[in-house]
Amino acid sequence: MKIRILLAAAVAALLSGCTTTEEANTAIQSRWIGQPADAFFTRYGPPQSRFPLNDGGSIYSWRGGDKTNYIPAQYAQPSTDDDDVFGKSVTKTTTREDGNETTVTTTRTSFGISDNTPRMIAPARTEQLFCEVQISTGPDDRITTIRASNDTTGEGLSLSRCAEVLEVQK
């Protein structure tokens, strides 16, 4: 029980150091609003699309940080509890007294079929990681708004792929 509490505390401590999408959005906005859109695209790559606005500005869609992670299958090991008689020999002794004060002892031994094969609890899968950002600019092509419109989890324990790709410091 103590190990579970310590493990939960360790996970909580690790996650507290991770950047969420909202924190990434705040950092990205403070860094890029007012900057030329070309500076963003020069650093991180060209936009996927551009939609011109009537006022002379534009709305850009940008995507980056594409990566496919392979997540191996997860297996559970067979139980080794003493209460589990599967795969173990069991001896049962019964003693009873007859009316003649005779003691009868019966001993039975049975053997279970041993199956030490781990059981699959989750199949192998792939996970797509990426960051999509929507950028609005004014007629002077300076960024007026920028936000992560689609943000997956990052690598490892990170909560935001955009924070990783756009180099957000915690």
Image (tube, rainbow, N blue to C red):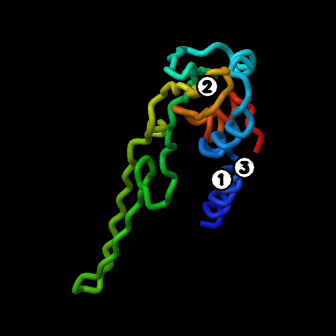
The image's mark for residue 137 is 2
Q: Secondary structure at mark 2?
A: strand
The image's mark for residue 17 is 3
Closer to the chain start, of discs 3 and 2, is 3
Q: Position of residue 152 (x, y in %)?
A: 55, 33
- In space, the residues marked 1 and 3 are separated at their CA atoms by 10 Å
In the rendered structure, the answer to whether residue 34 lies left or right of residue 117 reads: right
The residue carrying mark 1 is 11
Number of marks drawn = 3
Q: Nearer the viewer, mark 2 or mark 1?
A: 2
Question: Image height check: is 74 above or below 44?
Answer: below
Q: Amino acid at mark 1?
A: Val
Badges 2 and 1: C-beta atoms under 8 Å apart?
no
Q: Nearer the viewer, mark 1 or mark 3?
A: 3
* Residue sitting farthest toward the right: 169
Query: Is residue 157 shown to the viewer in this render?
Result: no
- In space, the residues marked 2 and 1 are separated at their CA atoms by 40 Å
